Image (cartoon, rainbow, N blue to C red):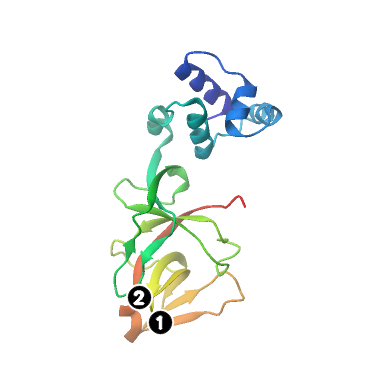
Amino acid sequence: MKINDLITMISSRIGSSINQSMLAESLGITRQTVCNRIKNESEVTVSELQKAENYFNIRLFDSVDAEYDIAYIDYYTDVFASCGNGSIIFSSEKTKLPVSTSMISGYSKNKLYSMINATGNSMSPTIENGDKLIVEHWNGDQIQDNKIYVFCYNNEFFVKRLSKNIDEIIIKSDNPEYRVRTISAKSISDLILIGKIVATIKSLD
């Protein structure tokens, strides 16, 4: 959706025309920025749609969900409540966030997704501290070599690249300061695979 389309949609919903200054105020940007984005035909982000909804006290997603394939995903603000003792328990503290399905690799309505926070720098520069990660929950598929997974091992929570060798799992960080680790065949049963990272929303901090 382009900026001009958003202006038209909001005007239709509230029953009166809005101008660039009003839209800029609702999005927390300058009027000049709105003007430049109209000239550049830049797309409106999902978070900007949310801001416009809140500012004008209207619902926009009802009208754009079908056309723009918006999915509402459970966002767990404190990641996991428990990662030990063989069970993965999500915190009850969650909210639903709208996400464009076009940014989710291999998106399917038949798959389960959640969003969590990234902490630490072991996957830098691919994933930075504070980034939001969309997880496609594991459903028994084979590990895809060199994909980034969320898993629990020895009661610790990890976001790493995984690869399968003949009789072991190789764990790699994108940050070269962290060494490559392996999980031997006799310890693989201690690995609890939660899911695969299928999208990263970069932190603005």
Q: Residue at x 37, y 68 (%)?
A: 143
Quadrant of the rendered structure where residue 185 is? Answer: bottom left
Q: Are marks 1 and 2 in contact (CB under 8 Å)?
A: yes
Q: Nearer the viewer, residue 43 or 50?
A: 50
Q: CA distance from mark 1 to mark 2?
A: 8 Å
Q: Quadrant of residue 78?
A: bottom left
Residue furthest top in the image: 16
User: Residue visible at 43% across and 65% down?
Assistant: 149
In the displayed orientation, state which residue is furthest to the front: 93
Residue at image position (48%, 30%) is 53
Kindly state the secondary structure of the residue where label 2 is placed. loop
Q: Can residue 74 be seen from the camera position used here?
A: no
Which mark's residue is nearer the viewer, 1 or 2? 2
Q: Residue flagged by tag 1: what amino acid is it?
A: Ile
| Residue that label 2 marks | 191
Please state if 81 lies on the left or on the right of 202 as rendered.
left
Q: Give the number of the disc on residue 183.
A: 1
Using a 10 Å C-alpha cutoff, classify the residue at mark 1 as few (fewer than 14 neighbours), some (14 to 19) or many (20 or more). Answer: some
Q: Is residue 143 visible?
A: yes
Q: Amino acid at mark 2?
A: Leu
Image: 121 above or below 183: above
